[in-house]
Image: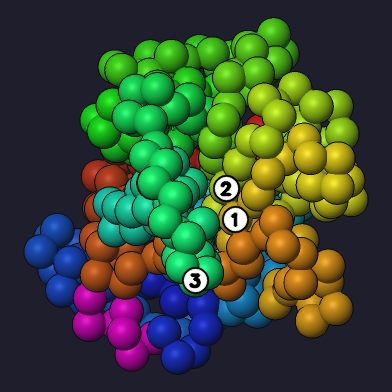
Amino acid sequence: MPVNVLFSARPALWPVYEPLLTRYLAEAGVEARLGTEFDPDQVDYVVYAPNGGLLDFSPFTRLKAVLSLWAGVEKIADNDTLTVPLVRMVDHGLTQGMTEWVVGHVLRYHLGMDRHITIQDGVWAPDAPPLAQERKVCILGLGALGEAAARALASLNFTVTGWSRTAKDIPGVTCLHGPDGLREALSRAEILVLLLPDTAATENALNADTLALLPKGARIINPGRGPLIDDDALLDAFNAGQVGHATLDVFRVEPLPPDHPYWAHPNVTVTPHIASETRPATAAQVICENIRRGEAGEPFVHLVDRALGY
C-alpha cells in the first residue's frame, strides 16, 4: 500500500520538489503518492514549511512524522496539535552554503577588506593583517552548521573556540560548554559567529552583560537567528566602542523595516537573510531518506527534541 505524502509549503515550490521527491522515493524503494491535497486522515507524512499555511495537525490521525524543509523549527516546535515526530532540515547543501558565507565574512573581517575597499583618498598605508593563527574566532552553537563552520575555519589555521550547551569534541577546535564556558568563549572572541537555535534559553544571548565580555572592538557575525541579539544593547555597544562592527543576516522582523537604525549605522552590514537556504535537490534526498526510515522502522535522523526546541 503506498504511503501518502502531503506537501505543505509555498505552492511555488511544489513543481520543484515533486519530481525530486518522486525520483528519490522510487530510488529508496518506497511506493508513495505525493500531492498538495489529501484527506487529513489519509496522510502518512507531511513535508512542511511554516509558510505553507498548515497549523492544526489534529485531523491527521494517521500521521507518522512531519518533515520540515527549514533548519529552524521555532515556528512549529511548540504547536500543541503536533504529537508525532518532528524532523528538522539538515542537508549538506544548506550546510555548505552556510559554511561558505561564514568563512567569507570571517575572512573579510580578518583581512580588513572593508577598509581597503573604501580607501579612495590616494593614501598609501600598508598594514598587513596577522596570519590566521593569530586571529581568535568564536562560534556560539556547535550543531551541524556551527560544527561545519568551525572545522572550515580551523582548517585555515584560525584559532577557533566553540561553545555549546553540552560538551562537544571537534578536532582543531577548543570546545567549551556551560555558563563558565560561555564567559570564557566570549572573552576570546575577536570575531564572534552566532549559530545558536532560537529558543527561550537563547533569546538575547548577546545582551549588555555578554557584549561586555568581548574583547574591545570585537566583530560580530549573525547568520543564526535575529532574537539572539538584544538590538538596543548592540547599538549601545557600538556607541561605546565595545563592538567594532557587526554583519547581520537575520532579524527579529523580516524584511528589516526601512526605518530600523541598522540600515544607516556605520558599524553594521545588513544582508537580507541570504547566508544559506534549503536547496531542493539535497533537501529532497534528506526528506526521502527519513520517509524510507519511517517505513523501515528505523530512527529518523535530525529528530527535534521538543523540550529543547531544536
Q: Which residue is mark 3?
A: 120
Q: Which residue is mark 1?
A: 247
Where, quadrant-wise, is the N terminus in this rendering?
Answer: bottom left
Cα separation between marks 3 and 2 = 26 Å
Taking the image as shown, residue 149 lies to the left or right of residue 62, namely: left
Residue 69 visible? The answer is no
Q: Quadrant of residue 129?
A: top left
Q: Is residue 3 above or below residue 8?
A: above
Image point (40%, 22%), residue name: 134
Q: Which residue is mark 2?
A: 221
Image point (60%, 55%), residue name: 247
Majority SS type along the magenta span: helix
- Amino acid beneath label 1: Thr
Residue 192 location, x and y as percent?
57, 36
Circle 1 crowding by C-alpha within 10 Å: few under 14, some 14–19, many from 20: some
Residue 136 location, x and y as percent?
48, 25
Residue 228 location, x and y as percent?
72, 44
Q: Is residue 195 above or below residue 44?
A: above
Q: Which residues are magenta?
A: 14-20
Q: In terms of sequence position, does the residue under pointer 1 or pointer 3 come before the other? A: 3
Cα separation between marks 2 and 1 = 5 Å
